[in-house]
């Protein structure tokens, strides 16, 4: 059984939609540190890899180890194109996530997570984890089960309060039905909705034993750490303490929102986690955000941490899933000092501040036509008739308002589902011939990456580990 005390000192952060893909996680795990795959939208990532011809045959190789061959056959028949998509053809879409998904749709989530973790664990005896966003709820249960079937050693979750997940992991490790509360806006008093997943119908014989992975909650406050340590549904194995300099989504500042002259949220003393108080909970923790520098590991351990979590340095390594042309563009402009990282309070439809990387020539998302066809960040709400509906502040404005949303909430919002998928070269082709533009996110460490690069134009995950240990 994996526990936090057996995890390495360096955790490679879970980033984007498959920026932390199996290649990066495997490369990090081979160095003896914790490689982490991103579980966000991994079902879409897998079927798009198949539609692009599955270069190298990696997806199909992992599928051959999946314990449900009939499900594999169905997915291959539906999505695999041996020669890839013909020019001008868009990707075939999956149905959007919702509270109740068909058994086949749930199975696809199980398969996608299994494939990603299986590939990350190939050829070494290192450790691999999976990162999920608490706010992206609908696919979490089958995704966790698929990752556990593949032998994942750790689960990391933030962007919300994952209090029920430890108990979920306990039940899934026993192949038992699991459920957790489904967050629905405007739910009538006394009404409660759940998301459920039952592994039993998948098996025709007795299922094999699977291990319960370690669970690390990603937190940004002492109060959340204390609450999870005392009131989680099962064993919390440790914490990743993430500060506002980390990439992707940041926790909002505590108290009333105030902005700088440049329009960025202002963080203060109330947003600094008291490491001594976290230590008193008796659980190990890793420090994230601003940890991608020489000496950060030793400093964190001197403060009582088990280690550090680093994302940005790994995001631009050769093995990461970020499209090669985007890595080259950012690193090239970084050397000239014209790359900025901005904490945008409006970009994400979740309402959380979101880090956005800009450089001369970066795609301009302001002219993008609004589409909502992936739906991972949609919010569930109760309709006037009592049904469950779904809306997103980044969908077409009139659609959002028609569903009871405020027009003001749509201002400045970006479609992160499509943009982050475009970051890895899987941008959807639209009817007018345009392709979805990417939106790069990184931590504040990015602007100091030139010191790490030196005269190099590229580097590997092993180079990052060597730098952090040195």
Image (cartoon, rainbow, N blue to C red):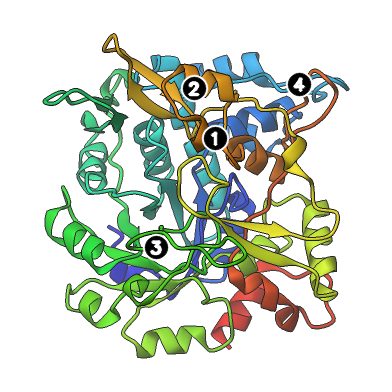
x then y, percent, for residue 167:
19, 44
Q: Is residue 351 visible?
A: yes
Q: Position of residue 106 (x, y in %)?
A: 41, 23
| Residue linked to disc 1 | 410
> Which numbered dot is residue 253?
3
Query: Which residue bears the numbered disc 2?
Result: 401
Work out how far the residue at label 1 is from the one at label 2, CA to CA, in angstroms: 9 Å
Instruction: Tell which circle, 1 or 2, labels the residue nearer the N-terminal end.
Output: 2
Q: Earlier in the sequence, mark 3 or mark 1?
A: 3
User: Where is residue 54 drawn, in percent x and y?
Assistant: 72, 33
Residue 337 as seen in the image, left or right of residue 183: right
Mark-to-mark CA distance, 4 and 3: 40 Å
Residue 424: in sight, yes or no? Answer: no
The residue that mark 4 highlights is 90
Identify the mark nearer the N-term, 4 or 3: 4
Element type at mark 2 = helix
Q: Earlier in the sequence, mark 2 or mark 3?
A: 3
Rate crowding at label 3 as few (under 14), some (14 to 19) or many (20 or more) other CA atoms within 10 Å. many
Q: Say which label, 1 or 4, has the lower sequence index.
A: 4
Q: Report the residue at 88% width, 22% height from top.
A: 87
- Residue that appears at 34% across and 34% down: 141
Do the residues bearing badges 1 and 2 touch, measured as CB atoms within 8 Å? yes
49 w.r.t. 161: above or below: above
Q: Nearer the viewer, mark 4 or mark 3?
A: 3
Structural distance between the alpha carbons of marks 2 and 3? 27 Å
Query: Please, which residue is most extreme toward the right here?
Result: 87
């Amino acid at each position: 059984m994996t526990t936090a005390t057996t995890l390495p000192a360096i955790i490679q952060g879970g980033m984007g939609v498959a920026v932390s893909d199996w290649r990066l996680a495997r490369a990090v795990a081979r160095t003896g540190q914790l490689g982490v795959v991103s579980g966000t939208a991994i079902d879409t990532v897998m079927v798009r890899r198949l539609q692009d011809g599955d270069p190298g045959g990696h997806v199909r190789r992992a599928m051959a180890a999946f314990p449900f061959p009939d499900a594999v056959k169905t997915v291959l028949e539906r999505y695999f194109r041996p020669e890839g998509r013909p020019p001008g053809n868009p990707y075939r879409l999956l149905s959007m996530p919702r509270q109740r998904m068909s058994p086949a749709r749930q199975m696809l989530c199980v398969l996608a997570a299994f494939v990603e973790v299986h590939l990350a664990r190939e050829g070494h005896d290192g450790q691999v984890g999976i990162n999920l966003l608490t706010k992206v709820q609908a696919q979490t249960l089958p995704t966790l089960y698929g990752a556990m079937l593949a032998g994942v050693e750790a689960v990391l979750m933030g962007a919300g309060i994952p209090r029920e997940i430890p108990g979920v992991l306990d039940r899934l490790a026993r192949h038992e039905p699991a459920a957790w509360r489904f967050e629905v806006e405007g739910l009538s008093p006394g009404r409660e909705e759940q998301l459920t997943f039952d592994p039993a119908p998948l098996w025709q014989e007795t299922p094999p034993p699977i291990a319960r992975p370690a669970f690390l909650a990603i937190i940004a406050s002492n109060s959340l750490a204390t609450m999870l340590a005392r009131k989680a549904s099962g064993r919390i194995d440790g914490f990743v303490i993430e500060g506002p300099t980390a990439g992707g989504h940041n926790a909002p500042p505590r108290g009333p929102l105030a902005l700088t002259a440049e329009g960025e949220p202002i963080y203060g003393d109330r947003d600094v986690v008291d490491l001594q108080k976290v230590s008193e909970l008796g659980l190990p923790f890793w420090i994230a955000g601003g940890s991608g520098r020489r000496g950060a590991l030793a400093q964190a351990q001197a403060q009582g941490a088990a280690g550090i979590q680093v994302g940005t340095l790994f995001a631009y390594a050769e093995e990461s899933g970020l499209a090669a042309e985007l890595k080259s563009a950012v690193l090239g402009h970084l050397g000239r000092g014209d790359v900025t990282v901005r904490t945008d309070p409006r970009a994400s439809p979740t309402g959380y501040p979101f880090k956005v990387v800009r450089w001369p020539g970066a795609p301009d998302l302001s002219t993008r036509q609004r589409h909502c066809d992936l739906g991972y960040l949609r919010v569930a709400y109760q309709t006037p008739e009592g049904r469950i509906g779904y809306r997103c502040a980044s969908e077409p404005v009139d659609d959002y308002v028609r569903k009871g949303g405020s027009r003001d909430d749509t201002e400045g919002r970006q479609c992160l589902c499509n943009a982050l998928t475009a970051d890895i070269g899987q941008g959807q082709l639209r009817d007018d011939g345009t392709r979805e533009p990417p939106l790069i996110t990184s931590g504040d460490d990015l602007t100091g990456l030139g010191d790490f690069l030196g005269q190099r134009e590229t580097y590997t995950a092993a180079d990052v580990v060597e730098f952090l240990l040195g």
